[in-house]
Image (cartoon, rainbow, N blue to C red):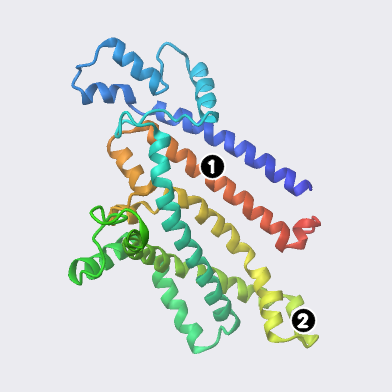
Amino acid sequence: MRYLIRKVLFLLIAAWAALTLNFFLPRLMPGDPASIMVAKYRGMLTPDAVKALEISFGIDSDKNLALQYVDYLSDLFKGDFGLSVVYFPQPVTKILAKTIPWTVGLLGISTVIAFVLGILIGIQTGWKRNSLISDSIVPISLFLNAMPYFWFAMLILYIFSFVLGWFPLGGAYDPFGSSEGFTHVLSILKHAFLPAITIIVTALGGWVLTMRNSMINVLAENYVLFANARGLSDKKIKYSYVARNAILPSFTGFAMAMGFVIGGAIMTEIVFSYPGVGYTLYQAVIGLDYPLMQAIFLFISVTVLVANFIADLFYLILDPRVRYGVS
């Protein structure tokens, strides 16, 4: 219980710190959204219109930072993130509602697939670490782990889309096709295939290496030797004694990876022009859309914190030493 209370307190303090930084950082940057809109309309806005924009963007110059901070927190709890500059006058929440499902659907599923495959391969290569297959998988995993995902994305896009024409060059679905039914679902899957392969292939090597190294370390523990001495089957020792303990360090990495899903693999989404959060963040940076950037950064921070908290809860289930306070 003490462990859980400590983790909850850390979550709340870290979330408050993320909210506070998210408020001050954009205000330390040069310019503001209202000034950008004035420049966009080449000064053809009246002072009243500029004042209305300042209020809409939450930067009312008549209020000091403390009052702006209180209004900022109040708007957050109401789900109001202001108006977007790039997509003006659309609310930021409406834009995020359109983009988050694409990112979660693509990167969430791809990250889970890469994690599961990496763990399974890592278990086998760690268990039979002196075999020919294990020795060959290690350099392959090192290569995949070091390979830039945007380079791999451009490579397979050129080969399978531009040269062979098997897959579309970009987007999330065919804009000229049917917007419902099996044809639409097939179009979505076809557009998501290459981005998903990019994420799975480039992330797989890291999970394999992490799990393999953890397996090798756990195999040297005394309780594994004792399990062998008791005459337990190899299958039970491999999964119940070794893999169960070796997977614990991977959960933290997986939680971080799932947390960053909300931010998207920015370069992958840019290469494939995939309308997720990462591509939207790129558009916001290019257009100096501070409210949209602020909302996306906040979502990334909160999801990483929540994902790590969930990983800590899994530690309670998987590791009895955490439950009973044993180091």
Cα distance between the residues tagged 1 and 2: 42 Å
Q: Which residue corresponds to mark 1? A: 302
Instruction: Please tell me how many numbered marks the rendered image carries.
Output: 2
Residue under the point 34% across and 44% down: 280
Amino acid type for the residue under numbered disc 1: Val
Q: Position of residue 111 (x, y in %)?
A: 47, 61
Q: Which residue corresponds to mark 2? A: 227
Q: Is residue 209 visible?
A: no
Judged left or right of residue 136, residue 212 is right
Q: Quadrant of residue 29?
A: top left
Residue under the point 53% across and 88% down: 131
**Mark 1 secondary-structure assignment:** helix
Amino acid type for the residue under numbered disc 2: Ala
Q: Position of residue 146 (x, y in %)?
A: 39, 66
Judged left or right of residue 175, residue 1 is right
Q: Residues within 10 Å of mark 2 (few under 14, many from 20)?
A: some
Name the outermost residue toward the front: 181
Q: Is residue 300 visible?
A: yes
Q: Quadrant of the C terminus?
A: bottom right
Give above or below for 88 relative to 62. Answer: below
**Mark 2 secondary-structure assignment:** helix
Residue under the point 72% across and 86% down: 233
Q: Nearer the viewer, mark 1 or mark 2?
A: 1
Q: Which mark is residue 111?
A: none
